[in-house]
Amino acid sequence: MDAEITLTVDGKTRSVTVDTRTTLLDALRERLDVVSPKKGCDHGQCGSCTVLLDGRRHLTCLALAVAHDGAEVVTADGLAALADDGGDLHPVQEAFLRHDGYQCGYCTPGQVCSAVGVLAEAEQGWPSHATEGLDGEDPVDLTDDEVRERMSGNLCRCGAYAGIVAAVREAAGR
Amino acid sequence: MRELEYVRATDVLGAVRAVAGRPQDAVFLAGGTNLVDHLKLGVASPGLVVDVTGLPLDELEEFDDARGTGLSIGANVRNSDLAAHPLVRRSFPAVARALLAGASGQIRNQATTGGNLLQRTRCVYFQDVSTPCNKREPGTGCSALDGYGRYNAVLGWTNDCVTTHPSDLAVALVALDATVVVVGPGGERRLPLHEMYRLPHGAPGQDTVLEPGALITSVELPREPVAARSTYRKVRDRASYAFALVSVAAALEVDAEKRVHDLRVAWGGVAHRPWRAERLERALVGRPLTEDAIAAALDEELQDARTTDQTAYKIPMLRGATTATLLDLLATGRPEEGTR
């Protein structure tokens, strides 16, 4: 079964007809030539396909494209526009560069999208498994442990975690 | 993968009828974190998916009426929203802790309350269609019985199915006496979440007692003082983003003499369903909560446990996790603190 869907991807509205079995990841990469989200495991275990979907970090490999008709997708390619500071890169991306938060770079688009999501979640006071008490509603202080826990859905087989933690903390202003 | 018809449901009854009308062939789709994976793996091959995410089931509200007082959680409330909600964090900390101990930040943003409760086992053989599995294909045999069995059950299992239920949330909800509201072809009904789940006996393919087309529309948590003194402890192979080897949801109230006034304990990672430790609870109520008393209560609860070489480790792990959780709840004025 085919379905026509419309997505806003990195600020551009795009319509495409997809088979209903198509994942959002395949629709982006194979149909819309948006190749910033990467296909790593394709089973929700590695996080390399992470985008911001309607403002939240979201896996695109475990999502049917047809179920997200009308959604707003921001990939790593479109993050800079979110920052609204006129730069070519989002502050999270700049921090990854400064702290060497990657080696081969394959997981990086997912890492930076996830990190932008983490900053927003911490700002809203969302607790994590690493948060000591549940009572606080203030923005969460992103310690090393907090960053590691919150970023655990993004694997880096090069093992650039030390740089990633430093980058996320710097972007959080800590 | 089979051709797939996709329907976006616009009302609950319409969704229920659509799935009930094609009972072997139609499934509900919510967050998709489990189902979409199953479509790829061939574990599920429906001809029709009915997307319920557009249904108005995303309210989280307190109630005080004929049902008592409590919190109603719409089936479409996302795991991340539920875990972050101030009321859940304050009055049902075990629920927030269980959610935060599960999956990843991305998956919690996608996964729904109803979908979490109905997720399928992560048994490696269930997910590998090249191997026999009674849950996936009844009558073919159980590969986990003599295969890789480290995650297998230690309570209530049969030779037909030795798997465990994967949800953390379900364990916390069972401990806190949650009720599920279900709409089926015959209308709406309520049942204790604990009774929605089943052991594998006779029908290992069935995780729950729900009939085809039955849709969870909400979960109700009774507001009781003990629920605010609850927590969740999960033991896993790595620090984050892994399923439980064993887990403990517990809620404890003691009286002025430090005797157990109210106690709820449920276990994850040990059985085909979240395991409510009722014998243990009964053995401890009215008694001082000492390490010896807990050990004796654990003996009672675990008298029917059956382990293999691969699962024997779970018993001391479960005993240790339960003892530590209860003593933490007893010791800390704010029991939630430091009991992760």
Image (cartoon, helix red, strand yellow):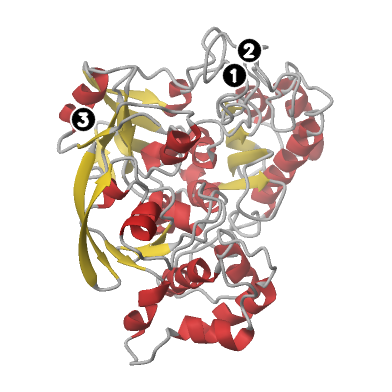
* Mark 2 belongs to chain: B
Secondary structure under the numbered disc 3 in the rendered image: helix
Q: Chain of mark 3?
A: B
The residue to which callout 3 is attached is B15
What numbered label is drawn on residue B141? 2
Badge 1 marks a residue whose secondary structure is loop
The image shows residue B307, relative to residue A38, as above or below, that is above
Dot 2 and dot 3 residues touching (CB under 8 Å): no
Give the left or right position of residue B204, taking residue B1 as reference.
right
Q: Dots 2 and 1: beta carbons under 8 Å? A: yes
| Screen quadrant of the C terminus of chain B | bottom right
Residue A148 placed where, x, y %? 62, 67
Give the spatial CA distance, label 3 vs label 1. 30 Å
Q: Are marks 3 and 1 on the same chain?
A: yes
Distance CA(mark 2)–CA(mark 1) = 5 Å
Query: Residue B133: which disc?
Result: 1
Residue B154 appears at what percent x and percent y? 71, 24
